[in-house]
Amino acid sequence: MAGLFGFFDYTKPGKGVEKEEFKPNLSTFFRVLSTRFWKLLQLNLIYIIFSLPLIAVIFAFVPIGHGEVDIIALFKVCIFGLLYLSVVGLAPVTTGFTYVLRNFSGNRHSWVFSDFFEHIKKNFKQALLLLVIDVVISLIVPFIYSFYTNITNMGAEVSAFYKNISFMARTFVVMFSFIYFIMHFYIYQIMVTFDMKLKQILKNSLIFALSHLMRNIGVFIIIFAIAVLSFGYNTIIGVLLSILITPSLIGLIINFTTQPVVRKHMMIQTADDNKETEQS
């Protein structure tokens, strides 16, 4: 489990950041969680308030029936809605959210309110462009998935060849969606840490998503399990937990487990670039 956890020193300065190295293991994670718990509650509440437009969209997909099919559909909306809110979110809001979590996951101090709003402001233009990309992909992917699913489920009027092609295309859509989702494990962390163009951020995030796929799948399984457990007993309890702590907990886990990847690759690259600049 220790292989999933880590931290790195950041290149973008920020107030309230102090240098204190610690071992990236499971005990450290729970120590950070316990010492920052009340601040995580504060951060979660702020994040929920400023994510209300996204939450309203998620609730628009909630079925109004009470049948077995509707209950299952409600459970799916709650699970995937919580994961989308916690990982992708509304990009400008999530930058402030991630900055505070980045510091907390590195056992560094952060002012919840001031740092949250300051880094929304600092990264707003870049995050707004990312939000547009997220919205476009979120609208197109379900349509394409539904299109190929309908072809796959058609009867004898469609040949087996076209059904197989549609099945493979649908599989590709699912794979693309998953990869783009786990890219967000890194996108915001890189955005609030390095001065890079969005194209570079997306490129690096894609590289990390693919080159550390097993780690990312492990993280996804953990946060998926948290989402399922949150809503597994009762929907109202799941909603209350989401308002209180769940997105912050998921975000803390993501930042805590992906930092070693960024440290290993991007921090070394940044140091080499600075060295080359000084020599020139």
Image (spheres, helix red, strand yellow):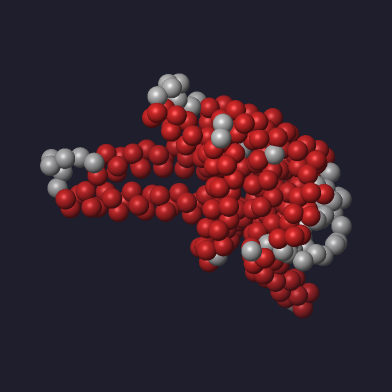
User: Residue, x 76% and y 47% (percent of image)?
Assistant: 100
The image shows a total of numbered marks equal to 0
Residue 68, position as x, y percentages in the image: 40, 28
User: Residue, x 37% and y 38% (percent of image)?
Assistant: 143
Residue 236, position as x, y percentages in the image: 60, 28
Residue furthest front as drawn: 233
Quadrant location, the N terminus: bottom right
Residue 178 in the image: above or below residue 210: above
Q: Look at the image and tell me whether residue 199 can be seen.
A: no
Residue 52 in the image: above or below residue 280: above
Asked whether 93 or 196 is in front, the reply is 93
**Quarter where residue 152 is shown:** top left
Q: Is residue 180 left or right of residue 107?
A: left
User: Residue, x 43% and y 52% (percent of image)?
Assistant: 176
User: Residue, x 47% and y 37% (percent of image)?
Assistant: 76
Q: Look at the image and tell me whether residue 56 can be seen.
A: yes
Quadrant location, the C terminus: bottom right
Residue 44, position as x, y percentages in the image: 71, 38
Residue furthest left as drawn: 156
Residue 196, position as x, y percentages in the image: 66, 56
**Quarter where residue 238 is shown:** top right
Q: Is residue 244 left or right of residue 64?
A: right
Q: Is residue 205 left or right of residue 105?
A: left
Asked whether 48 or 265 is in front, the reply is 48
Residue 272 in the image: above or below residue 122: below
Residue furthest bottom as drawn: 279
